[in-house]
Amino acid sequence: MKKRVWSGIPIVEENTKYYSLKDELRRMGKPYYKRLVHSIVNNNILQAPGFVYYKCSSRAKDEKEISACFEKLSSLIGDLNDRYGKLYAVEDHRGDYMDSKIPISMTNQETGMHTDSSAHDYYPKIVGLCCLQAAAQGGELKLCNGANYFADSLISSPEIIRIMKQDFIRDLITPGKEKSPELLKLNKFPIFHMEDNQFLVRYMRYWIERGTLEAGEFLSKDATQAMDHFDEYLNDPSNSLTIKMQKGDMVFFNNEFLLHGRTSYFDSAKLKRKILRAWINLQV
Ligand SMILES: [Fe+2]
């Protein structure tokens, strides 16, 4: 169990690596670099704290160099999933995910705390984010440890955990994939899964509620209350980290036990938030 209570700024500092673009791009070609990356994955990402933060210390921050650095580092960590393209651009397309078919990643709205992917057959083990441009206002990244909640609630609220170990329908949102009530009913899996001491949390409340509704089913009062309890934990600032990524910063985090979210944001004419996302699976 990857249990560790967050401690705000100190935990970010402990897990921050400073890099300069040109030096890092040069180092990436060396044989020792891959070993270095694997040790970071094993020591920081696969176990507590579950993330590593790369802070760009270069004075000149060229967008192409930042992207190249992020792509190379991501592909040294593991295999890049390409169902949304190997590097997916998260930016505001001026829509509302609640009343249109666009994903929340294409809006400037606040996201609830979640894990990535609502598909039954796929989730990325590691998510990488790279900031090409910070928003003029807002757009902070939030991280919270779902394994801590699970471990605490197993003792204090076992009934809630029992409910969340049941299957929940999730919306089908992969572009180009067919959607029907029958297919939605097949796209269901638990919020918490624990087997052979392997912990997995898969949660995005909005996709659960919309998927369930569109499948013609309803959530029980107990299920709603269980999610309320989880959300209360996730939204308590003392349980999460909030980081404003700056241009050139990268973060890689474990999508099996950490949940993430972002605050709403506003772009200006000059500063338009742009984040690259990579979904990474480890070579087995
Ligand atoms: Fe996400």
Image: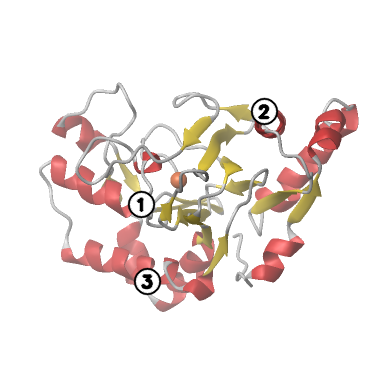
Outermost residue to the front? 269
Disc on the earlier residue, 3 or 1: 1
| Callout 2–callout 1 Cβ contact below 8 Å | no
Outermost residue to the bottom? 156
From the viewer's perspective, is residue 215 above or below residue 222?
A: above
Disc on the earlier residue, 2 or 3: 2
Q: Residue at x 17, y 65 (%)?
A: 221
Q: Quadrant of ligand 1?
A: top left
Q: Amino acid at mark 3?
A: Glu
Nearer to us of marks 2 and 1 is 2
> Is residue 202 rendered to the left or right of residue 217?
right
Q: Which residue is mark 3?
A: 232
From the viewer's perspective, is residue 117 above or below residue 283?
A: below
Q: Nearer the viewer, residue 65 or 165?
A: 65
- Give the alpha-carbon distance from disc 3 to disc 1, as whole Å: 19 Å
- The picture places residue 74, in percent across and down from the top left corner, at 66, 33
